[in-house]
Image (spheres, grey):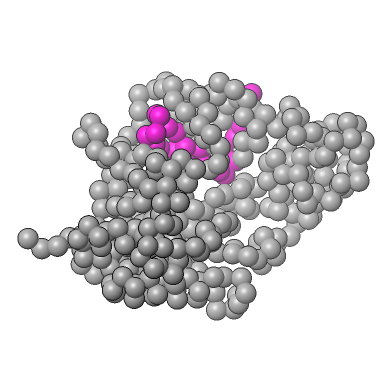
Amino acid sequence: MPTTRIFVGLSGGVDSSVAALLLLEQGFEVHGVFMKNWEDTYEVGYCTGADDLEDARAVCKTLGIPLHQVNFTAEYQERVFHNFLNEYRSGRTPNPDTLCNTEIKFRAFLEHARRLGADRIATGHYARTIMQDEHLNLFKGCDHNKDQSYFLYGLNQAQLASTIFPVGDFSKARVRAHAASANLITHAKKSSTGICFIGKRPFREFLSRYLPIQPGPIYSTEGTLLGEHSGLMFHTIGQRTGLGIGGQRNGSGEPWYVVGKDLVQNALLVAQGCYHRYLFHRQLQASQLKWIIGHPPKLPLRCHAKIRYRQSDQPCVLESHHDTNITVRFDELQRAITPGQAVVFYSSDKCLGGGIIDLAYD
């Protein structure tokens, strides 16, 4: 019987390195694939792509497996980056990682691997798949501190059936220890953070290269003019730093926080205090819904949700709005619900799906 051939997406980090190692130890035919998703020719000092490629090469040499390179920059521009810019133009705060997963890592990469003869693909994500009720279900990684199911809520049944998450049962400490035992160069490499194509570059500098800067007024929630912002795209709900009004200590004397954006007036709305009532809402509306099993659950549904990656699961009820939208009603007030970000739904450790936040309200 022929050996199953698995292509592993190698990022140059420890998690994907150990994913390849584990599959090799299990007797699979393993190939490494390094994906280039961003053109960094003129961005020396910001992008770590060249270093990551060298680390991926070193891992493959240690493991004795081939390394393939593929350029997905055109696909990334069309399917991910254009959406990123459009969201900022609309005054929202996107998270491109989820779209990168559904469109690049588990679509373009999967299609490319199939053309090269792969049976399945694998990544270093901390997540698990389990067959239940005739469906493949997505579960949190066993290490809840590293769980990445939040970024994978958009995957469909075909993508999950073609994918293995080898480190889903591992803790981060165990992954590093296993890498060290195999003398992998990545065993102590620091985990990457932030948006991949921005790298170490200042966010304002990066965004201003692609979108026009449009200054406008900063108002308090009472209508007092406090100053001028350099562009709504540089600010997000709940933001405290970088407002340029730190000396405005009227009212309570507490720091200012972004609580809203008025796109018609190009105005930034701020309020004083980390616990100001304008920062908290009980309900949100979301669209662009994706469900792991391919269709929505029966509503209303009591479950849990998170509105940002590092948030703990929050009890809520999902209520039907109409065919393309859903209303999420939380048991407790939620701070800084941000349009453009993902809201992801869970039943215990099982990821049900998610969508993109459109608005928050009481």
Q: Is-magenta flag for residue 347? A: yes
Is residue 322 something that shows in the picture? yes
- Of all residues, the one furthest to the front in this rendering is 181
Q: Look at 81% across and 40% down and name the residue there.
A: 256
Q: Is-magenta flag for residue 149? A: no
Q: Is residue 109 left or right of residue 29?
A: right
List x then y, in percent, for residue 231.
74, 54
Q: Is residue 32 left or right of residue 287?
A: left
Q: Look at 26% across and 53% down and name the residue there.
A: 162
List x then y, in percent, for residue 332.
59, 22
Q: Say if 31 sits above or below 247 in the image.
A: below
Give the quadrant of residue 106: bottom left
Tally of marks: 0
Is residue 352 something that shows in the picture? no
Q: Look at 52% across and 28% down and name the residue there.
A: 314
Name the residue nearer the viewer: 142 or 174: 174
- Of all residues, the one furthest to the left in this rendering is 1
Give the quadrant of residue 153: top left
Which quadrant: the N terminus? bottom left
List x then y, in percent, for residue 287.
48, 38
Q: Is residue 184 left or right of residue 97?
A: left
Q: Look at 76% across and 29% down and name the residue there.
A: 276
Which quadrant: the C terminus? top right
Name the residue nearer the viewer: 328 or 33: 33
Q: Is residue 360 left or right of residue 38?
A: right
Instruction: Write down the region rendered in magenta.
Output: 339-362
Q: Main secondary structure of the magenta part?
A: strand
List x then y, in percent, for residue 76.
46, 63
